[in-house]
């Protein structure tokens, strides 16, 4: 009998690219990967280069661009846009949309060891590249901070 990821201490990671950099996210923090054809709607006082909202199954889902959320230069959303819908793992509800350039697939790896408050929980070698492993809860918290910071700046 093969041990499951839970029993072995491994977890499944969704790998993707943003601006030619490799990222991964524990699949437990992914609600869905979706593709949208239209631009997202603006959030009042939030500049378009930061993000907006999309209709996600009838709810408004904030979408933040990688340059605003992760400080990634050269990340421009394409049309159609692939968006990873992320949860903070404290609930099953969608909390954030992150546009990505390309979904690469799923890999098994050691459980992520998150320390500090940076959304990049660790860096790990994958297929000859260094992957930035994101922590879903920190990513959602970072997004909230970006949005709240923009609202405070506008006040």
Image (tube, rainbow, N blue to C red):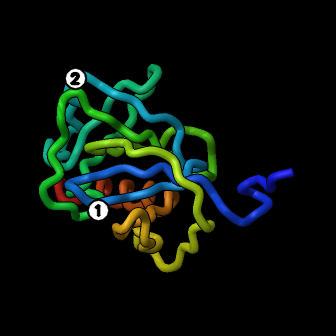
Q: Which mark is residue 129?
A: none
Using residue 117 as the reference point, say whether residue 4 is left or right of it. Answer: right
Q: Is residue 44 visible?
A: yes
Q: Residue at x 56, y 38 (%)?
A: 93
Give the structural element (helix, strand or loop) at label 1: loop
**Residue underneath mark 1:** 70
**Residue underneath mark 2:** 38
Q: How many marks?
A: 2
> Quick one: quadrant of the C terminus?
bottom left
Dot 1 alpha-carbon crowd within 10 angstroms: few under 14, some 14 to 19, many 20 or more: some
Dot 2 alpha-carbon crowd within 10 angstroms: few under 14, some 14 to 19, many 20 or more: few
Q: Residue at x 44, y 39 (%)?
A: 85
Using residue 120 as the reference point, say whether residue 29 is left or right of it. Answer: right
Tell which of 58 and 101 is nearer to you: 101
Q: Position of residue 11 (x, y in %)?
A: 63, 58
Q: Position of residue 55 (x, y in %)?
A: 36, 24
CA distance separating discs 2 and 1: 23 Å
């Amino acid at each position: 009998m093969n041990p499951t990821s839970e029993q072995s201490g491994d977890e499944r990671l969704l790998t993707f690219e943003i601006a030619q950099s490799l990222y991964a996210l524990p699949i437990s923090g992914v609600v869905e990967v979706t593709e949208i054809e239209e631009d997202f709607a603006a959030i009042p006082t939030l500049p378009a280069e930061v993000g907006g909202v999309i209709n996600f199954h009838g709810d408004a889902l904030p979408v933040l661009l990688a340059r605003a959320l992760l400080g990634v230069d050269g990340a421009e959303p394409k049309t159609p846009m692939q968006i990873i819908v992320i949860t903070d793992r404290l609930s099953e509800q969608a909390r954030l949309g992150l546009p990505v350039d390309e979904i690469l697939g799923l890999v098994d790896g050691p459980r992520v060891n998150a320390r500090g408050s940076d959304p990049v929980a660790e860096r790990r070698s994958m297929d000859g590249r260094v992957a930035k492993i994101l922590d879903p809860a920190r990513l959602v918290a970072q997004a909230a901070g970006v949005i709240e910071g923009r609202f405070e700046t506008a006040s």
